[in-house]
Image (tube, grey):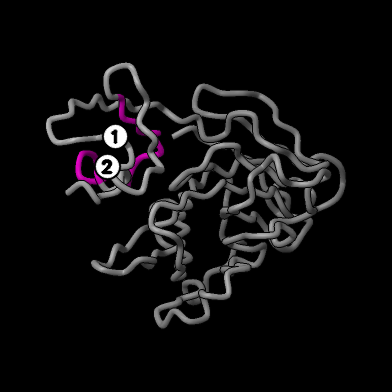
Amino acid sequence: PSNTCVRALVNLVVDLDGSNDEVKFLMGNNLIDMRAPSLKAAGIEDGSVLTLVMQRVRVWEAPLTGANASITDETNSGMMVTRLGSGFRDALVIGNQRVRFFHLKIAEIDRVWTGALEVGFTACEPHTLRMPLPEDALGLPTHWVMDSAGKFRTTDTNVEDCDDNIRSERNWTQGELHSGDVLRVAIVRNIISGDSTPSASFVVEVNDVVKVRAAVKLERHQLLYPVVNAYGKTRKVELLND
């Protein structure tokens, strides 16, 4: 139908739930406005020929970094983030690309501190954030994160209204994280027909085992920026390019 939004057409053509690829439509040599509220508004008519273009997104290209975060030793699969100095925080890293999920690997553990890695997302446009960055992820104006104690935390007041909010796996503690562990951090959509603001889940997996799951509400096509903080026991992590 002509009142179908362009993003809905994308969803009919390609499944992006397991991908961070950026998708665009071309009509001839002209780029279609992917934010158009309808096919008609985008200039797409019955019989129009569209070309689907998929662009690989490098999740961690040109990230913002906190005062103690050092980007070092770029690898084929990603880049290393090391917390400098003798402190336990202020090693925040924020990606410049909106994503559905991201992966990272624990590279080095520091046994001195309590608390550990913070991971999650923010809706803040990186260029709007004031420097220096906050000392931890909870200082971001908007956030959906697993904090340094392994618990889900957010600035979104709608979360409290979700009946299926499971903050973390029973007995889970980040003290269980070891060098070599791989984490997947994702916003998993749960589209409900007729719901203008469908529910989703914030999920953290460690070696393919879900450790944190929390119900959240986001706009249908909203993507968020990835956030990592090499905090406490976690001194070095490898940010993986998916």
The residue shown at (56%, 23%) is: 75
* Helix, strand or loop under label 1: loop
Q: On the image, numbered disc 1 is attached to which residue?
A: 43
Whether 174 is drawn above or below 208: the answer is below
* Helix, strand or loop under label 2: loop
Horizontal side of 173 relative to 184 (left or right) equals right
Callouts 2 and 1 close, C-beta under 8 Å? yes
Q: Quadrant of the C terminus?
A: top left
Quadrant of the image occupied by residue 91: top right
Seen as rendered, the residue at the extreme right is 86
| Residue closest to the eye, 239 or 5 | 5
Whether 25 is drawn above or below 233: the answer is above
Please check the rendered image and state whether residue 87 is part of the magenta-colored stretch, yes or no: no
Quadrant of the image occupied by residue 85: top right
Residue 151's spot in the image, x, y percent?
A: 59, 69
The residue shown at (81%, 39%) is: 84
Quadrant of the image occupied by residue 55: top left
Inspect the image, locate mark 1, and give the three-letter code of the amino acid beneath it.
Gly
Residue 111's spot in the image, x, y percent?
A: 73, 54
Assess disc 2: are there few (<14), some (14-19) or many (≥20) residues with their C-alpha within 10 Å of its C-alpha.
Answer: some
Q: Which residues are magenta?
A: 9-26
Whether 218 is drawn above or below 15: the answer is below
Q: Which mark is residue 236?
A: none
The residue shown at (47%, 72%) is: 169
| Residue closest to the eye, 213 or 124 | 124
Residue 176's spot in the image, x, y percent?
A: 56, 60
Q: Which mark is residue 40?
A: 2
Give the CA distance from mark 2 to mark 1.
5 Å
Inspect the image, locate mark 2, and give the three-letter code of the amino acid beneath it.
Lys
